[in-house]
Image (cartoon, rainbow, N blue to C red):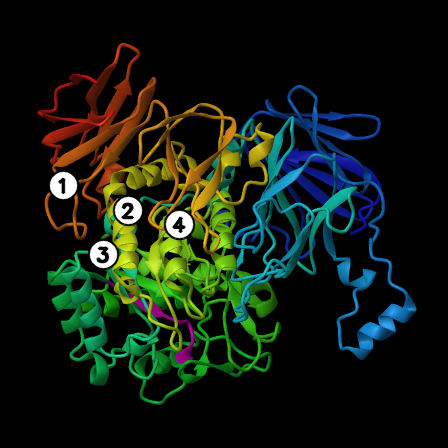
């Protein structure tokens, strides 16, 4: 990109249009803290899939011509635009936050001709400078103390400094390692934390893109893409939570899910008959292990054809689901995008008739292969295709299905990756696979969400493997085909933390690992992480050992049961976290750095996380270990299991036998809990248990019917719990819009339990 000298500017409809010698640059202050930097290199306007609707708040800003730059100022930011469309950002006090790098990129590898020949002999890829220059490229100056977070589901550690990544949704069956550049999701957003400031950058480009977080050179970091527009958002804010609030204002927030979806889920690619499913369901109930949801993988379909039911192995359509529903189970079914090529198959024939599938450049329907064999790919960029796909969800809803699990939607294919020139649609114009690949799963999730919302009338439950920024509006996600490896358990914590920081709040891993064989100890430790993961699903693959909790002996069964029961106990707390998330974008599963960003110790802390702001978990993630070195940040913390009081800003060694995940609760916390249950809806939840921890504090609890959208129109109750210095707990109903009030509160404090009837009037309780 060569822009040349700055020539002139004008302000039109809130956009500062700057003319350079070789192109146009646009600076748009959407809010006082969000600035869009754009140049129409491929298309005249934005064609964002992540940012829906007009996000500009119509703020006042000033534009001043300076000798060397153009200065654009909002209440919170000053933007200086120089020749070559170099852009620097300052806060309202004049401190430099982020500047474009003025030098040339310098590839740091020193490779001799002799070494290149050796690499060639062994068949290695030869890295060269030419691999790392892109048509769209932004290089930012390093100030020296940066830590980087976000970028979605990338492997490795929490802090992404000194690593490089790619955004290209990829189905890679090999065991994921730190060296992987890309996985299933493309979320081109990151947070930069410095000692004196924090900011976010969202590079809204759907093509294959590249991020180097100062790996290439300590003097800069960069992001770029082969094609598309120069289109990024600079997102300011005083704290990391403020950055996330601003980013999710821009790209959307996770809506409050149905309550049952926060319970425990059991899945396996290997339940091949209805007898398998009925047997698993019966065993859970017999052993009194709480569970809400069973997932059906591809075997439930007729020949792997989407929107069909395999009657030979799974019986009369709908009967299995109806029977399990009576016992409290909710069924989620997998759906892949690939539609089998088969005459007489109605989904295929209708899609062909209407032209809903991707095409070759010559105009033929493009065919590749997935599970059913030859398959065609819905063109989800076409609004008519999405409407058709949404309509197909009706078949599943009428069977009694409560959620849809979208898989293989990178899109995956068995005969090599789809060529970049395969023809897709981008809303109202032709496009290609190169541009639409990274948003394919996103658009499939959107279509699924809209179909479930229309035909089920409840909050849609959609799961996806592939997604893009903004997918959190429509879907939850899991981290894909992990393995039963201790390293993958360790990686689960920073991976879910970074997904949460990237806007994807409702996420989980396959508990126990999808591929390979889980050991009893690994499953026991993984369920201790899964207990606090927003999506809590045990899932495994054909060919691996089954990993239902009862298969490894009584000791390991008890550990699984203990943490699944704990999950159900904490459901109201988790539900509150999602209520909060819909308002501010903060995920339930959080790195400590999110709330303690000035604490240098937590910037690279990979083995702990926060469950909300009040509970800290430090699970054991190493084989054979029975102790855990735990860091507690500033403040007073209480050991969840013993009640022991601990001072923060310090490390401690906690005994952690197989059945103990070290947990600590922040002083002044009220943690709402449910009484024991086997599944959501088993009995009326008219009693709320309040675990109270000494110290001043306030907590707001949300209550609604857990299923539909009435809460968005005021159909909910809100309770305020306040711990005062005089040793009292105040309980007050501050909003009433849902008819079912709690009838009783049980207050637990310092080992003492008290019960109180509730009529809706304020209560004062001495602790």
Q: CA distance from mark 2 to mark 4?
A: 11 Å
Residue that protrudes farthest toward the bottom in the picture? 343
What kind of element bears circle 3?
loop
Label 1 neighbourhood size at 10 Å, few (<14), some (14-19), many (20+)?
A: some
Viewer-closest of 537 and 558: 558
Residue 403, picture quadrant: bottom left
Reading the image, the residue beneath label 3 is 291
Residue depth check, mark 4 versus mark 3: number of the one nearer the observer = 4
- Asked if residue 338 lies in the magenta stretch, the reply is yes
Q: Label for residue 137?
A: none
Reading the image, the residue beneath label 4 is 529
Residue 687 in the image: state x and y as whole percent. Answer: 13, 35
What kind of element bears circle 1?
loop
Q: Label for residue 685?
A: 1
Q: Which secondary structure class fits the magenta region best?
A: strand
Nearer the N terminus, badge 1 or badge 3?
3
Reading the image, the residue beneath label 2 is 567
> Marks 2 and 1: in contact by CB < 8 Å?
no
Q: CA distance from mark 4 to mark 1?
A: 26 Å
> Marks 3 and 2: in contact by CB < 8 Å?
no
Nearer the N terminus, badge 2 or badge 3?
3
What kind of element bears circle 4?
helix
Residue 132 in the image: state x and y as whole percent. Answer: 76, 59
Nearer the N terminus, badge 1 or badge 2?
2
Residue 17 in the image: state x and y as whole percent. Answer: 69, 39
Nearer the N terminus, badge 4 or badge 3?
3
What kind of element bears circle 2?
helix
């Amino acid at each position: 990109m060569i822009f040349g000298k700055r020539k002139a500017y004008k302000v039109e409809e809130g956009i500062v249009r700057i003319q350079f010698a070789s192109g146009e640059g646009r600076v748009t202050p959407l809010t006082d803290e969000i600035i869009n930097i754009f140049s129409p290199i491929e298309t005249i306007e934005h064609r964002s899939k992540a940012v829906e609707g007009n996000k500009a708040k119509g703020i006042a800003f000033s534009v001043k011509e300076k000798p060397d730059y153009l200065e654009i100022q909002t209440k919170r930011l000053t933007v200086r635009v120089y020749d070559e469309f170099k852009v620097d950002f300052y806060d309202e006090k004049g401190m430099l936050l982020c500047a474009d790098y003025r030098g040339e990129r310098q590839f740091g590898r020193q490779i001799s001709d002799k070494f290149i020949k050796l690499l060639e002999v062994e068949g290695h890829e030869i890295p060269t400078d030419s691999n790392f220059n892109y048509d769209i490229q932004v290089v930012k100056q390093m100030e020296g103390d940066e830590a980087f977070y976000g970028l979605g589901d990338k492997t490795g550690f929490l802090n992404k400094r000194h690593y490089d990544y790619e955004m290209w949704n990829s189905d890679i069956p090999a065991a994921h390692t730190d060296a992987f550049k890309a996985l299933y999701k493309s979320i081109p957003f990151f947070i930069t934390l410095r000692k004196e400031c924090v900011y976010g950058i969202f590079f809204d480009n759907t093509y294959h893109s590249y991020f180097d977080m100062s790996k290439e050179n300590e003097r800069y970091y960069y992001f770029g893409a082969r094609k598309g527009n120069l289109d990024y958002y600079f997102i300011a804010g005083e704290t990391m939570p403020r950055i996330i609030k601003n980013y999710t204002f821009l790209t959307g927030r996770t809506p409050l899910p149905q309550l049952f979806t926060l319970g425990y889920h059991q899945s396996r690619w290997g339940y091949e008959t209805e007898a398998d499913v009925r047997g698993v369901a019966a065993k859970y109930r017999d052993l009194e292990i709480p569970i809400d949801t069973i997932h059906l993988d591809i075997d439930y379909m007729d020949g792997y054809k989407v929107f069909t039911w395999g009657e030979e192995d799974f019986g009369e359509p709908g009967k299995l689901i109806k029977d399990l529903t009576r016992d409290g189970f909710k069924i989620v079914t997998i759906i892949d995008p690939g539609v089998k090529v088969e005459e007489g198959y109605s989904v295929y024939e209708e899609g062909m008739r209407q032209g809903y599938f991707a095409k070759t450049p010559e105009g033929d329907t493009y065919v590749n292969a997935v599970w059913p064999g030859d398959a065609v790919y819905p063109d989800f960029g076409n609004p008519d295709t999405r409407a058709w796909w949404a309509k197909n969800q009706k078949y599943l809803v009428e069977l009694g299905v409560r959620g849809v699990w979208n898989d293989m939607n990178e899109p995956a294919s068995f005969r090599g990756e789809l060529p970049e020139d395969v023809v897709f649609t981008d809303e109202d114009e032709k496009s290609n696979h190169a541009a639409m690949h990274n948003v394919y799963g996103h658009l499939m999730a959107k279509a699924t969400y809209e179909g479930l919302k229309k035909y089920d009338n409840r909050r849609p439950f959609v799961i996806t493997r592939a997604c893009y920024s903004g997918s959190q509006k429509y879907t939850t996600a899991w981290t894909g085909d992990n393995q039963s490896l201790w390293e993958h358990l360790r990686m689960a914590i920073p991976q879910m933390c970074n997904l949460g920081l990237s806007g994807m709040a409702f996420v989980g891993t396959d508990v126990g690992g999808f591929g390979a064989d889980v050991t009893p100890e690994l499953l026991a430790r993984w369920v201790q992480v899964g207990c606090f993961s927003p999506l809590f699903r045990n899932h495994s693959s054909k060919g691996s050992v089954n990993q239902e909790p009862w298969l490894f002996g009584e000791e390991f069964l008890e550990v699984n049961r203990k943490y699944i029961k704990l999950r159900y106990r904490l459901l109201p707390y988790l539900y509150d976290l999602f209520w909060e998330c819909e308002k501010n974008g903060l995920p339930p599963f959080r790195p400590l750095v999110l709330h303690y960003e000035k604490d240098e110790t937590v910037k690279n802390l990979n083995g702990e996380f926060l469950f909300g702001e009040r509970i800290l978990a430090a699970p054991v993630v190493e084989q054979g270990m029975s102790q855990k070195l735990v860091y507690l940040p500033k403040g007073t913390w209480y050991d969840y299991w013993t009640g022991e009081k601990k001072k923060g800003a310090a490390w401690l060694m906690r005994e952690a036998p197989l059945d103990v995940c070290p947990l600590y609760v922040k002083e002044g916390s009220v943690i709402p809990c449910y009484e024991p249950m086997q599944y959501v809806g088993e009995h009326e939840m008219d009693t709320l248990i309040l675990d109270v921890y000494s110290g001043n504090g306030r907590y707001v609890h949300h209550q609604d019917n857990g299923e539909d959208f009435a809460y968005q129109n005021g159909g909910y109750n809100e309770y305020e719990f306040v711990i005062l210095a005089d040793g009292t707990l105040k309980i007050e109903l501050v909003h009433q819009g849902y008819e079912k009030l709690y009838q009783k509160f049980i207050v637990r404090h310092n080992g003492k339990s008290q019960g109180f009837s509730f009529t809706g009037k304020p209560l004062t309780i001495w602790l």
